Image (cartoon, rainbow, N blue to C red):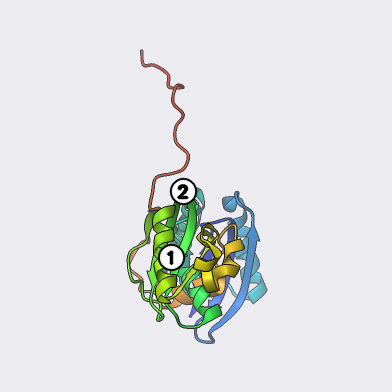
Amino acid sequence: MILLAIDTAGVDCAVGLYDSDLDRMLAARSETIGRGHAEKLMGMIDAVLDEASIALPSVERVAVTIGPGSFTGIRVGLSAARGLALALGVDIVGISTLAVLAAAERRRGGAVAVLAAMDAKRDEVYVQGFSPDAVALDDARLLSVDEFRTMAAEIARHGAGRVTGSACRLLEKDVAGESEEAATVEVDHFPMEDLAKLGAVAQASGKPKPLYLRGPDVKPQAGFAVARA
């Protein structure tokens, strides 16, 4: 199966082509741009298809990150993925960014329980736990930094797994433990290889929905409303 993977949920605009029969990435591109995903995405898809010498109609499934992450970026990726899947008549699957982080950590460090944790700003953290065989142990949720630190300390105390993601830099070094290297990570990146492999085995269940976990960071400014006549 040829799978097209798309990620615009964070600072990267990333696209990859994966052949599940060969278990091999055919091509992948990623640019750290912060903003402007909509302007970059379709050109990157064309470039990856050209690099792999794959025609768009050969794509048999589309996988896309659904968040948590950038609200605008999530919408861009989902809209593009839905449009492509509809035009091609293929399945689309949504994969959480937390699941991708956990998969990347397992690939680096072996089969172990992982707490994926992303710095959500506002003194909050997006978290979700995963078993050594990649099964979600709970729902993705939003914690305060203090709640996250308590959870991470318990994991370290009992040797119950590893913590990965940009929120590691909010931990003390003795708590970060094996994740100490991750404590320098300022932003999260979601590797195409891990997204693609998760997408290849995920259950397709209709149109994926965004995983925001909280309201948008940007709110209407007060004091500028025009009074009604």
Task: Report the amino acid beneath label 1.
Answer: Ala
Q: Which structural element holds mark 1?
A: helix
Read off the residue under disc 2: 123
For marks 2 and 1 on the same chain, the one whose residue lies earlier in the sequence: 2
Residue at 43 percent across and 66 percent down: it is: 153
Read off the residue under disc 1: 152
- The residue furthest top is 229
Residue at 35 percent across and 74 percent down: it is: 203
Task: Report the amino acid beneath label 2.
Answer: Asp
- The answer to whether residue 90 of the structure is visible from this angle is no
Residue at 44 percent across and 71 percent down: it is: 156
With 213 as the anchor, is 218 left or right in this view? right
- x, y percentage for residue 194? 52, 74
* Closer to us: 91 or 120: 120
Q: Is residue 11 above or below residue 92?
A: above
Q: Quadrant of residue 190?
A: bottom right
Q: Quadrant of residue 169?
A: bottom right
